[in-house]
Every structure is written in C-alpha cells, then in structure tokens.
C-alpha cells in the first residue's frame, strides 16, 4: 500500500512539473535554482533574527519601554512570514512570487521599525537582516517572472 502511494505521488509530481528540488528553467533554459536557495537562506536567517529580536523587545517592554511593543509585534509577524517564504521558495513552489512580494514588504516595514532603534545592537542587527532579506526577495522576484 505504501509503495503504491509513493508511486502515485511521484507520478503526480511528474505530471505537475517535476520533482521536489528540481531547478526552474525559463524559456531560454536558464536555471534559477541557485537564486531560489539564496532567497530561502536569507528568509531563514531573517526569521531567526526576528525571533531573537522579538524576545529582546519583550524584555524591553517588561522593563517599561512600551515603544518596543510595536517592534515586538512586527518582528513576530516578520519571522512567521519569512519562515513561510523560506519553505515555499526552497521547494520552488508555484507561489514563490506571491510569498516573495509579501515577504519583501513585511521585511521593509519590520526593518524600518527596528532601525528606529539602531543604537540598540540587537535592533540594528535585526533591521539589517530584514534589509538583506528584502533585497533577496526582490531579486528573487526577477527570477520568478521567467
């Protein structure tokens, strides 16, 4: 039974466009696999940075710095968005373009919020990581258009 299911899954994947992990090629035969993985890595790096920064912000809020409540929330949302984008892009999913657009916008807003506190080392690092991810997603969009 299990073998039959695996065979059906493999056939389904072949019918809809390949196997997981295969690189996308455009009409001219250019392989965009490297760009997908570069973007996925930037998304994963940003998600980890935002998770760490949201914990940092929670401590600052607990210490009475209520202006960090916004960055705590933006970092949480950014981490979640980046994690989803990293997963979809790594498998070269058909919605890579949509998630990259969303991720780039979320990273821009989160980066802007964190960089308002650039004298704080953690906030600056997070803002910088958001900028890197935003750039990687915007670059990725050029490759998903093919």
Image (cartoon, grey):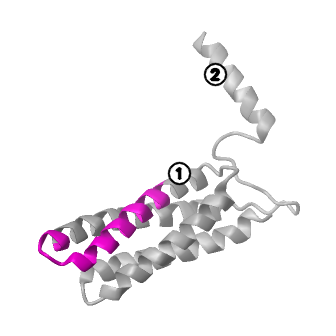
**Residue pointed to by mark 1:** 87
Residues packed near mark 1 inside 10 Å, few (<14), some (14 to 19) or many (20 plus): some
In the foreground, 85 or 4: 85
Question: Which mark is on residue 6?
Answer: 2
Q: Is residue 68 magenta?
A: yes
Range of magenta residues:
60-83
Percent position (x, y) of residue 51?
32, 62
In the foreground, 56 or 136: 56
Query: Against 26, is 13 above or below?
Result: above
Query: Against 97, is 8 above or below?
Result: above
Q: Quadrant of the N terminus?
A: top right
Percent position (x, y) of residue 82?
48, 61
Q: Is residue 50 magenta?
A: no
**Residue depth check, mark 2 versus mark 1: number of the one nearer the observer:** 1
Furthest-bottom residue in view? 119
Residue 125 sits in which quadrant? bottom left
Percent position (x, y) of residue 48?
36, 62
């Amino acid at each position: 039974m299990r073998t039959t299911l695996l065979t059906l899954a493999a056939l389904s994947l072949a019918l809809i466009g390949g196997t997981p992990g295969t690189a996308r090629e455009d009409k001219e035969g250019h392989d965009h696999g490297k760009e997908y993985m570069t973007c996925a890595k930037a998304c994963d790096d940003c998600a980890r940075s935002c998770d760490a920064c949201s914990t940092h912000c929670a401590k600052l809020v607990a210490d009475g710095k209520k202006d960090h409540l916004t960055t705590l929330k933006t970092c949480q949302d950014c981490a979640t968005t980046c994690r989803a984008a990293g997963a979809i892009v790594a498998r070269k999913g058909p919605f890579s373009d949509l998630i990259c657009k969303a991720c780039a916008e979320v990273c821009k807003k989160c980066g802007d919020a964190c960089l308002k506190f650039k004298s704080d080392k953690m906030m600056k690092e997070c803002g910088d990581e958001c900028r890197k991810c935003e750039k990687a997603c915007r670059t990725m969009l050029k490759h998903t258009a093919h």
